[in-house]
Image (spheres, rainbow, N blue to C red):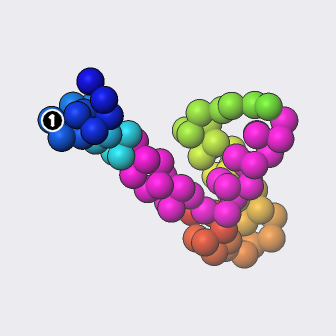
C-alpha cells in the first residue's frame, strides 16, 4: 500500500494519536516546570546525566528551602514552587 492508501483507509491513525498524546504530555510537563527545574534539566543535559523527574523536584525543593532558611525570603513560585 502507498502512503495515500494508508491515509484514505485510516491505517496508522493509532500511531498518530499516540505520538500526538505523547507530545501533548511532554508540553504539559514543560509548562509546569519552573525556572529552577528547567535550569537543572539544562545542567543535566550538559553533563550527560538523566535523573528522574521526582529526583529533580527533590533537588530543587531542597535548594529552595535552603535559600529561604538562610535569607529569610520566599522564592517566587515562578522560580521554584
Left or right relative to 71: residue 19: left
Please name whichever residue, 64 or 24, is drawn nearer the observer in this view of the structure: 24
Q: Residue furthest left?
A: 9
Residue 27: image location, x then y, percent: 47, 55
Residue 46: image location, x then y, percent: 83, 41
Left or right relative to 3: residue 26: right
Residue at figure coordinates x 43%, y 47% from the top left: 23
Mostly what secondary structure, the magenta segment? Answer: helix
- Image position of 16 with respect to 66: above or below: above
Please name whichever residue, 60 or 20, is drawn nearer the observer in this view of the structure: 20
Left or right relative to 57: residue 26: left
Residue 15: image location, x then y, percent: 31, 33
Residue 12 seen in this snapshot: yes
- Image position of 10 with respect to 78: above or below: above
**Quadrant in which the N terminus appears:** top left
Residue 18 seen in this snapshot: no
Residue at figure coordinates x 74%, y 55% from the top left: 39
- Image position of 40 with respect to 72: above or below: above
Left or right relative to 80: residue 13: left
The residue at which mark 1 appears reads as: 9
Task: Count residues near mark 1 (Cα–Cα under 10 Å), then give few for <14, some for 14-19, many for 20+.
Answer: few
Q: Residue furthest right?
A: 47
Check if residue 40 falls in the magenta segment: yes
Quarter occupied by residue 65: bottom right
- Image position of 42 with respect to 5: above or below: below
Residue 18: image location, x then y, percent: 32, 37
Label 1: state its secondary structure.
helix
Quarter occupied by residue 38: bottom right
Residue at figure coordinates x 60%, y 62% from the top left: 34
Q: Residue furthest top?
A: 1
Which region shows up in magenta? 22-47
Amino acid at each position: 500500500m502507498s502512503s495515500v492508501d494508508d491515509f484514505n483507509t485510516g491505517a496508522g491513525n493509532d500511531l498518530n494519536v499516540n505520538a500526538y498524546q505523547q507530545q501533548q504530555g511532554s508540553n504539559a510537563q514543560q509548562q509546569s516546570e519552573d525556572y529552577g527545574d528547567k535550569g537543572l534539566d539544562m545542567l543535566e543535559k550538559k553533563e550527560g546525566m538523566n535523573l528522574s523527574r521526582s529526583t529533580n523536584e527533590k533537588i530543587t525543593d531542597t535548594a529552595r528551602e535552603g535559600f529561604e532558611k538562610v535569607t529569610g525570603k520566599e522564592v517566587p513560585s515562578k522560580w521554584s514552587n
